[in-house]
Image: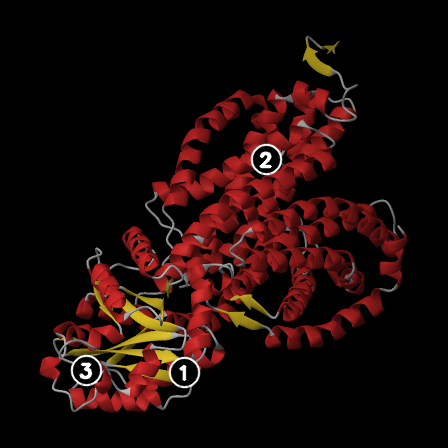
Amino acid sequence: MKFSKAVVKYRVPILITALVLMVPALLGMIGTRINYDMLDYLPSDMETVIGQDELMNEFGKGAFSLIVVEDMPSKDVAAMADRIKTVEHVDTVLCYDSLVDPSIPKEILPEKIYNAFNSGNDTMLAVFFDSSTSADVTMQAIKDVRAVAGQQAFVAGMSALVTDLKDLCEREEPIYVGIAVALACVAMLVLLDSWIVPFVFLTSIGMMILLNLGTNYFMGEISYITKALSAVLQLAVTMDYSIFLWHSYNEKLRTTDDHKEAMAEAIHETLTSVLGSSVTTIAGFIALCFMTFTLGADLGIVMAKGVLLGVIGCVTVLPALILLLDKPLQATKHRSLIPDMGKLAKNVTKVFPVFIAVFALLVFPAYYGYSKTNDEVYYDLGECLPKDIDYVIANSKLRENFDMASTHMLLVDSDTPSKDVRSMMKEMEQVDGVKYVVGLESVVGPMVPEEVIPDRLRETLVSNKWELILVNSEYKAASDAVNAQINKLNSILKKYDEGGLLIGEAPCLKDMIDTTGHDFKVVSAVSILAIFVIIALVEKSISLPFILIAVIELATFINLGLPHFMGQSLPFIAPICISTIQLGATVDYAILMTTRYKAERIAGADKHDAVTTALKTSIPSILVSGMGLFAATFGVAVYSEIDIISSMCMLMARGAIISMICVIFILPALLMLCDAVIRHTTLGMNGVKETHKHSGRLLHNN
């Protein structure tokens, strides 16, 4: 109680401190760099990542783009290439005319070289930048290249993707945060008992969100997914804590006229309850840190920090605001629109065998859909963007005009004999889906002496350590076909140069597929184990963690299984994150009901009355919490054109509703069914007797 009384006593200094902290928090938020490149989160010891570093260190090249130019005369294309070379951070522009000395007759050049860069009236340019794929200067360079190239040119490549993604995120984010706040506010106005308190909640939560976003400055940078979801998730998850404090405060006011004393008691009660509740949510987010794909740690740390700050704000800033605005808050109270749940609770408990049967019938199809959804996710980052965005249009032009869907790069030891390199390239050209393999050896041949190769081309393709070779593929990045192709190319490469490296978007995405497939199993196991241990400690039971996790896992299986039955494909990161987030964020509903059930049983109620009372008293809190999470995420899901954000928010919104339904209807049935097991495996319940109501008499059996 010392802490609670101190908060009440120093409420004005607490508010002043919180307001002062908003200034550095705002500056920190503005100063935190946002990373839009998912490939940056691959483990640093992977060959593709090492290869990208080697490309930068040895050739001074990082980002790579292909430009499709439609219906433009050769001399104008050459003039455009010269203008593109002047763009800051453009290192090299490769086109047909740049491959050999202009004095060499084109007739003696290999035909495949011409075909690699020309198709009908269309021309292709390959552009290398001296900065990394998602560096701020690279994104600016992409914009400058587009401005120079004009409307007849279309820029593809990962740097074009992250540039378009950044622009779209920056346009959308203020709008969908506003939508989340507005819908959460509507939900609270409808479900709470005051017209003003939702705005007080939003002020307190908003300050903690800003503090969370500001402290991300110390992480250096965060992912755009983390930035997009953290504010919405923190609002949704920590809203519960504010509601709990408000209800507790109003309960205390019924027994005392001293508002300060009532608030001190409410803070003490809230802190005890919320700590247990928040630990499961934090554990769910921390589990994401066990991913080797480090986007998990990025999201996990920021969200765990957000929940912790939400708890701190709930027991410091919010009580101070409520006490400051106590008179208008009390004056604008109204009757809650949530009806009495006694009748529903009695009916659910009465027909509990029906819900046991529903549980049993749902398990197999839900798990089947869930397992299939995990196999049907997509990894092509371009699929998360709208079809009319520049990057997607450029990729379509590459496929339609040049029958190209992806480009790989080979780094081969520069000491490898030319005849071996030629043999390797010929072997690679026989691999299914390989359209062309272009390198120095493609130009040098019996008809073209090595002396006529321009120095700038030699410097572009050969360093002291490596020779750079481009492989054009007909297969789309992240497809099964291209992954099989990469395996074959790697096998051929290692035969000629054991230390050779195969890099590019498609090889990186293949590594991402392999990495996240392993991560999914690890994160799911860690989150379930961590939350199992927390529930076991909180409830002092061995059996209850199994029951509670079974209910929420069923809800998760249903939620993540629906896309399979609906014919939808999810972005790869969604199932990993949602399975953990849904478990961590909604298991609180089950803990709330179970804690009350235990208290009722220990107080002497029979299992029927204990479960009925627990259900009746828990439904309003579960409804407010679940609808709050739904409201904060559903609007974003509908509005956002970025499929990763839209899909994850839709899964969270739907998951909140499904978890809510499962806890209200299936958990009471399982508590009824397993009552005897619970009593014998839960500390403090061993002495509780099973009580039956029969013929007006109470019969007690051990």
> What residue type is disc 3 on?
Pro
The residue positioned 57% from the left and 27% from the top of the image is 348
In the rendered image, which quarter contains the C terminus?
top right
**Label 1 Cα crowd, 10 Å radius (few <14 / some 14-19 / many 20+):** many
Q: Residue at x 30, y 65 (%)?
A: 387
Name above or below for residue 508 compared with residue 30.
above
95 left or right, relative to 119: right
Q: Which residue is pictured at 19% across the width and 82% down the height?
A: 449
The answer to whether residue 664 of the structure is visible from this angle is: no
Q: Secondary structure at mark 3?
A: loop
Q: Amino acid at mark 1?
A: Ala
Q: Quadrant of residue 603?
A: top right
Is residue 325 rendered to the left or right of residue 198? right
Pick the residue in front: 7 or 518. Answer: 518
Q: Dot 2 lies on which element?
A: helix
Q: Upstream in the sequence, badge 1 or badge 3? A: 1
**Secondary element at tag 1:** helix
Asked if the residue at tag 3 contacts the one at tag 2, i.e. Cβ–Cβ closer than 8 Å, the answer is no
User: Does the CB distance between marks 1 and 3 fall below 8 Å?
Assistant: no
Q: Relative to residue 251, is residue 456 depicted above or below?
A: below
Amino acid type assigned to the residue bearing label 2 in the image: Ile
Sequence-first tag of 2 and 3 = 3
Tell me how far mark 1 sits from mark 3, CA to CA.
36 Å
- Residue assigned mark 2: 549
| Image height of 455 relative to 428, above or below | below
* Residue tagged 1: 141
Q: Position of residue 489 (x, y in %)?
A: 30, 57
How far is mark 2 from mark 3, CA to CA? 71 Å
Label 1 vs label 3, nearer the camera: 3
Residue bearing the label numbered 3: 449
